[in-house]
Amino acid sequence: MSKSAATRPRPLSPHLQIYRFTPTMAMSILHRITGIALFFGTLLFVLWLLAAAGSKTQFDFINGLFGSILGRLILFGYSWALIHHALGGIRHLLWDTGHGLEKHTSRTMAIMTLIGSVVLTIALWGAAWALRGGF
């Protein structure tokens, strides 16, 4: 094997300690986390579909699980993850077109993605509550 002829040591990559944590970084991490959560939430949706295709007792059991306090919290989290991931995808799509790449604009878009996902999730559950006449 040949040896490198470099006389000085190679530079080290910047480490996380020198970076300041920004909203854009947080939304990037959260986008990945919501993508993973959507995978597991979709498995729950498939379980519900299988129960719907099965017997009435299976369907009633799964509906009972999803209708419990814990089940509704999971469904609320799933709907938030779905909305947040979709808004993050729209943000990435805008970046792909070359828009919103300025530092201030990307920071604002990151914050608005988080605020928008929370507001839209609450609006979705509020509309469902109003249409259903309560939970």
Image: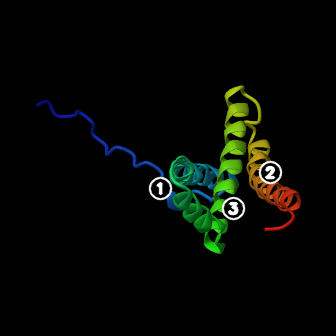
Q: Nearer the viewer, residue 105 or 77?
A: 77
- Residue assigned mark 3: 76
Q: Quadrant of residue 79?
A: bottom right
The amino acid at mark 2 is Met
Nearer mark to the viewer, of 1 and 3: 3
Q: Secondary structure at mark 1?
A: loop
- Residue assigned mark 2: 112
Residue at (72, 37) in percent of width and height: 90
Nearer mark to the viewer, of 3 and 2: 3
Image position of 123 with respect to 85: above or below: below
Q: Position of residue 52 (x, y in %)?
A: 57, 50
Residue at (75, 38) in percent of width and height: 102
Find the distance from the CA under tag 2 to the CA under tag 1. 28 Å
- Residue assigned mark 1: 15
Q: Position of residue 64 (x, y in %)?
A: 61, 67
Find the distance from the CA under tag 1 to the CA under tag 3. 36 Å
Residue at (62, 59) in percent of width and height: 20
Q: Position of residue 29 (x, y in %)?
A: 58, 53
Q: Residues within 10 Å of mark 3 (few under 14, many from 20)?
A: some
Asked whether disc 1 touches disc 3, contact meaning CB atoms under 8 Å apart, the reply is no
Q: Residues within 10 Å of mark 2 (few under 14, many from 20)?
A: some
The amino acid at mark 3 is Phe
Q: Quadrant of residue 121?
A: bottom right
Nearer mark to the viewer, of 2 and 1: 2
Q: Position of residue 94 (x, y in %)?
A: 73, 32
Q: Which residue is outermost to the bottom?
A: 69
Quarter containing the N terminus = top left
Q: Nearer the viewer, residue 74 or 51?
A: 51
Image position of 95 with respect to 36: above or below: above
The amino acid at mark 1 is His
Q: Secondary structure at mark 3?
A: helix
